[in-house]
Image: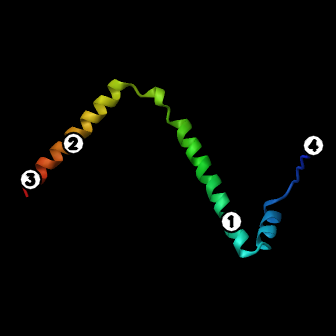
Amino acid sequence: MKTELQVDLSFEKILSIVKQLPRRQKVLLSRELEKELIDSKLTKLLKSFKANDLDDELLCKEIENVRQELYEGQGDQSHF
């Protein structure tokens, strides 16, 4: 048997409850909130970055461009 409970709490009420927690539990809550934020940002980033949008030809061209820039940069440094 599963019981589901839904409670409407305002931010102010939640904040008041959190302020009553011992320091250690506040730290644990803070870590959990941080994990939640990181997870949601990562999920959003992964959704926006689609591997299907990249093909081998585009990747090869970009790799060559970066290699060329690095090669040219090394040539400039050898003159010093």
In the rendered structure, find residue 2 and report the number of the disc placed on it: none
Instruction: Please report whichever mark, 3 or 1, sits nearer to the chain's N-terminal start.
Output: 1
Between the residue at mark 3 and the residue at mark 4, the CA separation in whole angstroms equals 74 Å
Instruction: Please report whichever mark, 1 or 2, sits nearer to the chain's N-terminal start.
Output: 1
The residue indicated by pointer 1 is 28
The residue indicated by pointer 4 is 1
Helix, strand or loop at label 3? It is: loop
Q: Amino acid at mark 3?
A: Ser
Where is residue 3 shown, x and y percent of the image? 92, 46
For label 4, count other residues whose C-alpha is less than 10 Å away and answer few (under 14), some (14-19) or many (20+): few
Helix, strand or loop at label 1? It is: helix
Residue found at x 65% / y 53%: 36
The residue indicated by pointer 3 is 78
Residue found at x 56% / y 46%: 42
Instruction: Please report whichever mark, 2 or 4, sits nearer to the chain's N-terminal start.
Output: 4
Instruction: Please report whichever mark, 3 or 4, sits nearer to the chain's N-terminal start.
Output: 4
| Number of marks | 4
In the rendered structure, find residue 69 and report the number of the disc placed on it: 2
Between the residue at mark 2 and the residue at mark 3, the CA separation in whole angstroms equals 15 Å
